[in-house]
């Protein structure tokens, strides 16, 4: 892989994880990492948001609920 491309991908990934961390924290949820169960290994990420916290977050962001 091109070294500059690898740096750009890592930078975007870190930024996305910071946003996710802020959303999960604002909703009162939890998140983390663990080993992937799929063949080939790797890592997986999970997030759990309580329904009440997610609804309040959406209302605060001005997103209409269906």
Image (cartoon, rainbow, N blue to C red):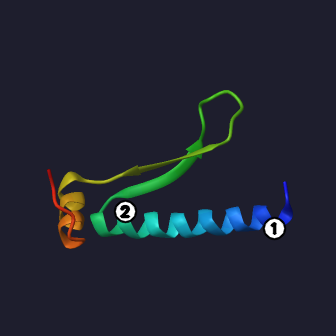
Left or right of 27? Residue 36 is: right
Residue linked to disc 1: 4
Q: With respect to residue 29, does 25 lie above or below?
A: below
Label located before the other in sequence (1 or 2): 1
Residue at 40% across / 70% down in the picture? 22
Outermost residue on the top side: it is: 39
- Do callouts 1 and 2 mark residues in contact (Cβ within 8 Å)? no
Residue appearing at x 33%, y 58% in the figure: 29
- Please state if 2 lies on the left or on the right of 63 as rendered: right
Eyeballing the image, is 46 above or below 20?
above
- Per the image, the residue denoted by label 2 is 24
SS for callout 1: helix
Q: Residue at x 66, y 69 (%)?
A: 11
- Quadrant of res 57: bottom left
Asked whether 45 or 60 is in front, the reply is 60
Left or right: 59 with respect to 20? left
Rendering coords of residue 14 (x, y %): 60, 67
The answer to which image quadrant residue 40 occupies is top right
Foreground residue among 42 and 10: 10
Q: Quadrant of the N terminus?
A: bottom right
> Is 56 displayed left or right of 9 in the figure?
left
Image coordinates of residue 64 in percent, x first then y, are 16, 61
Query: Going by the picture, which residue comes out furthest to the right?
Result: 2
Q: Nearer the viewer, residue 32 or 64?
A: 64
């Amino acid at each position: 892989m091109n070294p500059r491309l690898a740096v750009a991908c890592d930078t975007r990934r870190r930024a996305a994880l910071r946003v996710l961390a802020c959303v999960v924290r604002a909703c009162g949820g939890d998140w983390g990492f663990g080993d992937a169960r799929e063949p080939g290994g790797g890592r997986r990420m999970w997030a759990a948001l309580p329904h009440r916290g997610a609804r309040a977050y959406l209302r605060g962001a001005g997103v209409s609920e269906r």
